[in-house]
Amino acid sequence: MISIKSDREIKFMREAGYLNFLTHEEIKKHIKVGVTTKELDKIAYNFISSHNAKPSFLNYDGFPASICTSINDVVVHGIPSNRKIKNGDIVSIDVGVELHGYHSDAARTYIVGDVSKEVQDLVVNTEKALYQGLQQIKEGAKIGDIGAAIEEYAHEHGLSVVEELVGHGVGTNIHEDPDVPNYGKKGTGVTLKAGMVLAVEPMLNLGERYIYLHDDNWTISTDDEMPSAHFEHTVVVTKDGYKILTGDISDGEKI
């Protein structure tokens, strides 16, 4: 069932989203050569906990960490470990924050050191594809409009779209209806209504779109071992557009 959030719920989700933004900003300070992804996970856990909030992912369906850390050909759900970040890595960090009983979900891909122009373009264009999708959002638009815009932009820039993994609704659960695919046909799917909260999250590959699940039942990598990038924002649908809940708050509102 798709829920429409009240103004009060959206306020809570904006606070959870702003803490998500701040968590990413804190993690970003520590992403460098030689740091382990487990160290990043601890930084995130301590930061979120210090704000009287909870990491949404910790123990979610048994996930053993507070954030997902996905390096190079890992698309999503990488489990933090003693793996040290190296020069030339791209590191996707996915953060979920629960505050006041409501969740926020956001991901970024970070470039560490020297990468090829091709990999740099992958990261830049995956973020741009996210905003191409977001620009379709307003009351009366269709879910398919979002995916069609992301897919078109990705293909124009020589990137493939992972189809097995999709965005989703967000609320009192980290994953709610509806699904938000990163591909599709304009004018199809669920009609958007003001008050819907969606996580839009393109996962784009430099090679082919095909993926596989590791034996840990979480980590998902590209079949051809080519790099993948991931960007995500939680947004609320408005009458004439959308508002990002997992961005900075510029009007002085604090948590």
Image (cartoon, rainbow, N blue to C red):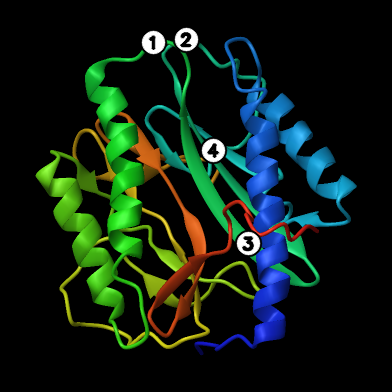
Image location (x, y in percent) of residue 252: 72, 57
Q: Assess disc 2: are there few (<14), some (14-19) or many (≥20) residues with their C-alpha within 10 Å of its C-alpha.
A: some
Image location (x, y in percent) of residue 15: 72, 63
Check disc 2 and give the amino acid type. Asn
Mark 1 or mark 2: whose residue is earlier in sequence: 2
Q: Which of 97 and 211 is in front in this view?
A: 97
Disc ID at residue 78: 4
Check disc 4 and give the amino acid type. Gly
User: From this viewpoint, is residue 60 visible?
Assistant: no
Q: Mark 1 points at which residue?
A: 114
Disc ID at residue 87: 2
**Cα separation between marks 2 and 4:** 19 Å
Asked which secondary structure carries label 1, the reply is: loop
Q: Is residue 49 left or right of residue 25?
A: right
Mark 2 or mark 4: whose residue is earlier in sequence: 4
Residue mark closest to the camera, 4 vs 1: 1
Q: Is residue 29 left or right of residue 73?
A: right
